[in-house]
Image (tube, helix red, strand yellow):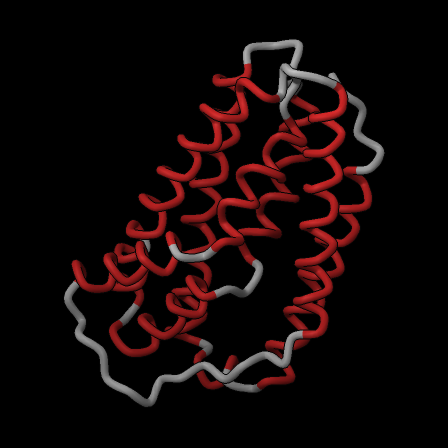
Amino acid sequence: MSLTAWLFFLPACFAINLAPGPNNLLSINVAARHGFMKAFVGGTGRLLAFAMMLALAATGLAVVLHASEWIFLAIKLAGAAYLIWLAIQLWRSDAPAIDTSQPQEAALTRIARHEFFVAAGNPKAILVFTAFLPQFVDVAQPILPQFAALGASFLVLEWVAIALYSWAGMHLGKWLMRAKIRRWFNRCCGGFLAAIGVSFLLVQRG
């Protein structure tokens, strides 16, 4: 994987990390109720789930990416289709309300466990690791080290996203309650992801 590919990966990946989803909305909820540190540290639960998914994806895809041009093309098209589909979903989202009306247990272990199961039960997550990350892998070079670098970058950016959503939940809770604001944010993320998805169609096999 070249430095250019990695630098292209970072903003594309961060757009996915920032896209509103169940875990990011959970961070807002926890921060609004229990403060920044509870939400930030509790977010390690989702990082553990994502790390496990990354390990499974890397070991499986290391084999198939070497197999043929057709498999590479299929993964490339799947990655592009996934991002464009996600962009459409974000653009059309009704920005469901953030519920802060019900009390929750503030124990860190409970928050982290909730984050873990929400992440592990989200089918979109495994699509990110099986259809998105391979776009940046050079099959002419050892694959597992590239997956390790991409996976580590993803987890770091995910933790940054946790911090940002936790901060937003603590400081901007009332502002984020407005559906119009969340809808605008969804559409910004969606537009960027659509552009990245279209660009995947131009990627050539390394």
| Res 175 seen here | no
In the rendered structure, the answer to whether residue 140 lies left or right of residue 22 reads right
Residue at point 45% right, 81% down?
Answer: 98
Indicate whether 37 appears above or below 94.
above
In the rendered structure, the answer to whether residue 119 lies left or right of residue 71 reads left
Quarter of image, res 77? top right
> Where does the image place residue 137, in percent across and percent down from the top left?
63, 23
Location of the N terminus (image quadrant): top right
Residue at point 49% right, 54% down?
Answer: 123
Indicate whether 96 appears above or below 150.
below
> Where does the image place residue 131, in percent across and percent down from the top left?
62, 39
> Where does the image place residue 3, in percent across and percent down from the top left?
65, 21
Residue that sits furthest to the right in the current view:
202
In the rendered structure, the answer to whether residue 41 lies left or right of residue 166 reads left
> Where does the image place residue 186, in percent across and percent down from the top left?
64, 69
| Res 99 seen here | yes
Location of the C terminus (image quadrant): top right
In the rendered structure, the answer to whether residue 138 lies left or right of residue 115 reads right
Indicate whether 125 appears above or below 99.
above
Quarter of image, res 50? top left
Residue at point 69% right, 51% down?
Answer: 83
